[in-house]
Amino acid sequence: MKTRIIKEKYKIEEIRPQEEYNKYIQLIKDDIEQIFNDNAGTFIKQCPACGSRESSFKFSKYGFVYRECSTCSTIYMTPRPTIEMLHNFYANSKGVKYWNSSYVQNTKSRIENVYKTRARWIKESIEFSSNSSNSYLDYYPKYSPFIEEISNLKLFNKLVAYKPFESVMQAISKSKFEIRTSIIDEKFSVISAFEVIDRFFDPKDALKTIYSLLEDNGLLFLSTTSASGFDIQYLLKNAKNIIPPINMTIFSIEGITKALTEIGFEIVEMSTPGTLDLQIIEKQIKDVQLPKFLKDIITNRDNSVKESFQEFLQRAKLSSYMTILAKKRK
């Protein structure tokens, strides 16, 4: 199994503009109050990743409760909004619309360090077999710059946007992507699902759908937040990249591995190529209780030591940003 190590240097503000992000969080809080009206949804009794029924309370945030699986350490929201409640939320959320807007997403740094990096990863990883359709599907796409980057690759015979967010409709209209809200008797060579799998009521069911849409030996490119990540483990409810009701399942490395392999995927590459864990902890040092050893690294050591520690987190798969390349087994 391959692991990617990323050494690019940038600040968290470059890919997550702080003023805009704080506004996004406040809008989400307002959405929760206006849309859910204290209705937390449906209680789920088993881990969405491994199926274990053993769990313990982890934290609560914005009125939603998260538990940790005692078997695989995946963190998941329960109770959680039903499918109908989630549809209503995404249709009416001012916060989601704001964060997905071109105003927030089309910054030069995000395009360079997020969307171009993803497109390059896909380009460098695919090898089409002689009987492949060379087709590509983006699963619930929501960022226009990524649509544009994939279109510019000119690698695929067919491009499909499956149930795209409203924020990408203009970009799709200018591209060669076809919009689909349902798919029957059609298979794809490559499917990407970036920052979406944690948002489903039943993420394993979504992964099964993706599996069914792939050709034999087809590839899934996936990204999500990792519960095994350094900053997540220490910040918990103070982690700014855990936002209920959007992030309902924060997979651990062990949890996502079990879910994918049980469905029938072979994991080709698993990485946590995040570069911001120490920056995040450093900025929120007052929100966390750290062992003296770690606090010393963050507050007293120079940048070369911090960079080495961040690289260690990547190599150990302990950064909170997780990417996976998985192949559909025959």
Image (tube, helix red, strand yellow):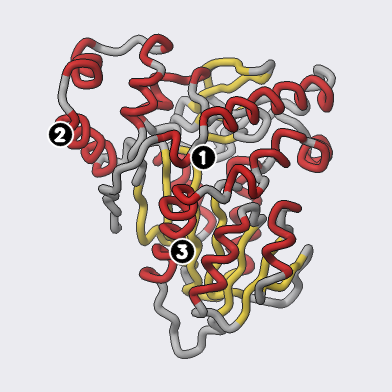
* Residue 145 rendering spot, x and y as whole percentages: 57, 58
In the image shown, does 132 or 278 lie closer to the viewer? 278
Residue type at mark 2?
Answer: Ser
Q: Residues within 10 Å of mark 3 (few under 14, many from 20)?
A: some
Residue 119, label in figure:
3
- Residue toward you, 278 or 219: 278
Horizontal placement of 200 versus 131: left or right? right
Q: Residue sitting at 19 percent across and 30 percent down? A: 303
Say left or right for 222 vs 65: left
Residue sitting at x 38%, y 32%: 229
- Please name the residue shown 29% across and 53% down the image: 3
N-term mark: 2 or 1: 1
Badge 1 local density, few (<14 within 10 Å), some, or many (20+)?
many
On the image, the x and y values in percent for residue 56 come to 52, 18
Q: Is mark 3 on a helix, strand or loop?
A: helix
- In this picture, is 16 found above or below 281? below
What residue is pinned by disc 1?
Answer: 50
Answer with left or right where residue 93 lies relative to residue 260: right
Q: Whole-Å distance between the Cαs marked 3 and 2?
A: 29 Å
Q: Which secondary structure, mark 2?
A: helix
Q: Label 2: which residue? A: 304
Q: Horizontal and vertical percent for residue 128?
A: 44, 81
Q: Are dots 3 and 2 in contact, CB under 8 Å? A: no
In percent of width and height, residue 317 lies at 31, 41
The reply to whether the C-beta atoms of the residues labelled 2 and 1 are less than 8 Å apart is no
- Residue 79 to residue 197: above or below: above
Which callout, 1 or 3, points at the residue further toward the start of the chain? Answer: 1
Amino acid type indicated by mark 3: Ala
